[in-house]
Amino acid sequence: MDIHKRMQHNSISLTFKGTVTFELIDSIIAIISNRLDQIESNVVTKKKVYGVMLECLQNLCFHVEKNNDLEYNPMYDQQSALFMLDSDENGYQITTGNFIVKDKTDSLKTWLDEINSLSEQEVKELYNKILRNKTFSDKGTAGLGFVDIARKVGKLNYNFNNVDDKYAFFAFNLNIKKVLA
């Protein structure tokens, strides 16, 4: 499909690479919400896309590593995160990426794998349990974000790519299927 036809098609395509701030989140949310209102008639689908997108952007704002000590490599911009949103006739794809200290990858992988091992009902139960316990980390989160995303999209797709001895790049790929009316 040529670019003009793709632009005219009822789709969304947004890619951002840089530092994620609360102001940027507000801008992206406003732009995408407006576009979703134009192209998506199903309210459930819109709410899922909006919720997952917001959670992913907040994760990038709160959890991106400030990697000033990474050896300079023109392939990597150590201070930035990556956010992509795309859509097609089947649904919406959200991809995020950010640097993470390798020491944290095992615990994050364990947490994501634990969430992925649960049934849909068990994910809902875990979500409610975390809400009831109200145990928050030093960054003000309770691990609820990934569980909330799993409630909306199902299995969480991710991978870690080694950057150097200290850092890895965490890529998170989510597919939100359109709810058929």
Image (spheres, rainbow, N blue to C red):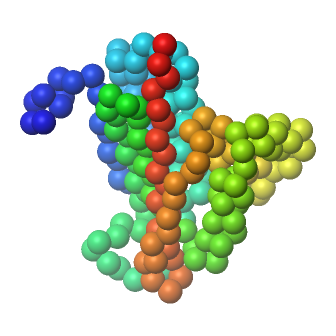
Seen in the picture, residue 101 relative to 4 is either above or below; the reply is below
Residue 59 is situated, as x and y percent measured from the top left of the image, at 58, 49
Seen in the picture, residue 134 relative to 79 is either above or below; the reply is above
Q: Is residue 140 visible?
A: no
* Left or right: where 174 falls relative to 71: right
What residue lies at 42% left-to-right and 68% top-to-bottom? 78
**Quadrant of residue 132 in the image?**
top right
Seen in the picture, residue 166 relative to 2 is either above or below; the reply is below
Q: Is residue 49 visible?
A: yes
Give 45 or 97, whichever is nearer the viewer. Answer: 45
Residue 107 is situated, as x and y percent measured from the top left of the image, at 69, 69
| Label tally | 0
Residue 51 is situated, as x and y percent measured from the top left of the image, at 57, 32
Which quadrant of the rendered structure holds the N terminus?
top left
Give 155 or 106, whichever is nearer the viewer. Answer: 155
What residue lies at 27% left-to-right and 22% top-to-bottom? 10
**Quadrant of residue 33 in the image?**
top left
Q: Residue furthest bottom?
A: 165
What residue lies at 46% left-to-right and 51% top-to-bottom? 173
What residue lies at 49% left-to-right and 73% top-to-bottom? 168
Give 88 or 14, whichever is nearer the viewer. Answer: 88
* Left or right: where 165 falls relative to 117: left
* Left or right: where 103 falls relative to 72: right
